[in-house]
Amino acid sequence: MIKNVATLLKKDILLEFRQQHTFYGILLYIAATIFVLYLSLPDSPEADVWNSLFWVIQLFVCVNTVAKSFLQESRGRMLYFYSIASPVEFIIAKLLFNLLLMLVMSLISLLLFFVFLNNPVSSSLRFTGIVILGGASLSLVFTLMSAIAARAQQNAALIAILGFPVILPQLLLLMRLSKAAFSEVFREGALWQLTGLIIGLDFLVIALAVILFPYLWKD
């Protein structure tokens, strides 16, 4: 199983390198959005504004990055994958690929935010860890939503319809957790409680993907 997952993951990475226009298009979207914020906002936006804008942009970056993961797969290609791999192996490989891709995009976004909108974060290392956790959470949810939408006549609008109600609680938790990096006093227990809750939601999404995707695969 591990070998098949690694092979499918390698396939997605090679396809991403061959279709670099998609990757660079997302980078351009990130850079242009942050540059527009730089032009329209004061030199040093307040920490709450900075934090909120960062996570809202991460949400839309994730939609643009992850949404294509299943929608770009043709019916013939899916039939081929059906003959060489199990649905669990396929969905795990997709989850891992989108997680890695979203982590790259999240870290690039964070770097550009620091460059253009200053750095109001008092603990950059802690905030970077929260960004990694948040990028993983967003990618897992939207990968599952993309799989469901792809089985519904390739309707990309379903990703937004299904994804946003699911992602909003996670997004609010991430915004609350990230305030711990802005000199806000947190009880240590509350900090770990929020982190554990987000990780628990991530494992729940993975479990749902592993359980539900075989039924979508058969369609």
Image (tube, helix red, strand yellow):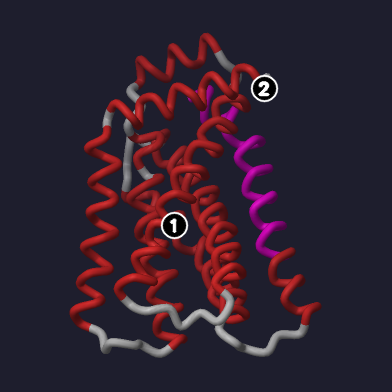
The residue pinned by badge 2 equals 2
Residue drawn at 56 percent across, 32 percent down: 91
What secondary structure is the magenta-colored segment mainly?
Answer: helix
Q: Is residue 121 above or below residue 113?
A: below
Secondary structure of the residue carrying numbered label 2:
helix
Residue stretch in magenta:
197-219
Q: Is residue 22 above or below residue 126?
A: above
* Lower sequence index among marks 2 and 1: 2
Q: Is residue 47 above or below residue 55?
A: below
Residue drawn at 48 percent across, 16 percent down: 81
Residue drawn at 44 percent across, 43 percent down: 101
Q: Position of residue 163 (x, y in %)?
A: 46, 56
Q: Position of residue 219 (x, y in %)?
A: 48, 25
The residue pinned by badge 1 equals 106
Q: Is residue 198 magenta?
A: yes
Q: Position of residue 137 (x, y in %)?
A: 56, 55
Q: Amino acid at mark 2?
A: Ile
Q: Amino acid at mark 1?
A: Ser
